[in-house]
Amino acid sequence: MNVMSTIRSLRIIAFLLFLTPTLALIGSLVTHNTLIGFKFKYDDNYNLENNLPGSTTEKIECNKQNNYCAKIQFEKNKKLNKCNKYILDRFTLSETGKILDKQILDKNDTSGKNIKKLSEDLNQKIFIQWKISNILNENCILNTSFHNLYKISPFIFEITAQLKNNKKTSFGTGTVINPILYGEASISNVVKRFPIKWIFKPLMYLSVMLMIIYWYYNNLILNKLQNTKIHNKFFIFGILSSIFLLLHVIFLGWTFESEILTKVRRTLIVFFILFEVLAQAYLIKDIFKIKSEISEYVNTTVVYCKLAFVFFICISTLIILLILLMVNLDHKVDYILEWNYFLILLLFYLLSSMMWRKKN
């Protein structure tokens, strides 16, 4: 492989190395927010003849067999567009049909003891019944503009609903977030959970592979341009940063009983940052030293930009570390710094894809 062919490959790898981790971070955040904000549900099927206000279900007697109505469950509708357009109120009724109370009074009665006591006190059978109110159900897709989109691509909505209702699904927050600006959650707290981890981890494993190739090609190109065969310092530091990133991704989400192992896991990302910054610093240093000799292969303006960016990252990293050591920052500030730092760090690779020339 000649120099220009290797440079073309490196340009592609560098751009992918900027794009892939960016998608991992932003894609994970967007997926988290999409699932959190998804409000459409599979409603209970009450076997109603119509979906209009005033309609009622059949009365159900509360007795020992159904644990005084505490065990009553309806089959769920299997499609989102089979939802109840209106909210249903549950009423508790006496034998004579008198309304005793509404659902809200029995909402926390999971044992049925309240209705059982009510039946004993009144010496009557107790029934429950559902009635369609005139209040629109905001969680029914039929009442929203999304219904037209659902008609076109129902599987997108169905898959999203199934993911959100999956027993394995969990979220780092209960609301839609923007940690880049407001710091509501750390990166790990968002990406370590199902199903977000199945977006983040594969993309990061791919990023590790791209990093190894990236440093290999940089080392190969400089060796060819200088007619040498050595492992440059940036190559060694770059491979070390790839290894520590790989270990961090592997152990992401693991829980250790040992406090020592927990601290070791936390240091993995620190070593990744350290070796990544060192690798980029030594790379630009080596390129800058011979920039006049390899001017036909590099864009000098971008070389200066990358040099300035390396200085910026080094100084920023030092300042951030000093602040973290000396000041007990609010956790939101920590998270804002974390999200923005890693996103900005990826500009290393974007600049690298622009630094090398396309042709002689």
Image: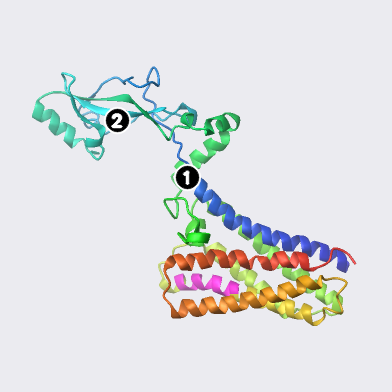
- Horizontal relation, residue 43 to residue 194: left or right: left
Q: Which element type, helix, strand or loop, lies under badge 1?
A: helix
> In the image, is residue 264 part of the stretch drawn in magenta?
yes
Tag nearer the camera, 2 or 1: 1
Q: Is the magenta stretch mostly helix, strand or loop?
A: helix
**Is residue 51 visible to us here?**
yes
Q: Where is residue 253 in the image (x, y as percent from the top left)?
A: 48, 60
Q: Where is residue 290 in the image (x, y as percent from the top left)?
A: 82, 81
Quarter of the N terminus within the rendering: bottom right
Instruction: Give the extent of the magenta segment.
Output: 262-273
The residue at the point 64 percent across, 69 percent down is 242
Q: What mark, if any, has residue 72 been given in the picture?
A: 2
Callout 2 amino acid:
Ile
> In the image, is residue 88 part of the stretch drawn in magenta?
no
Q: Which badge, 2 or 1, is on the more N-terminal residue?
A: 1
Mark 2 to mark 1: distance in Å?
29 Å
Q: How crowded is mark 2: few (under 14 residues within 10 Å), some or many (20 or more)?
A: few
Q: Residues within 10 Å of mark 1 (few under 14, many from 20)?
A: some
Give the residue number, with chain letter if any, for mark 1: 37
Q: Which of 8 and 194 is in front in this view?
A: 8
The residue at the point 60 percent across, 67 percent down is 245
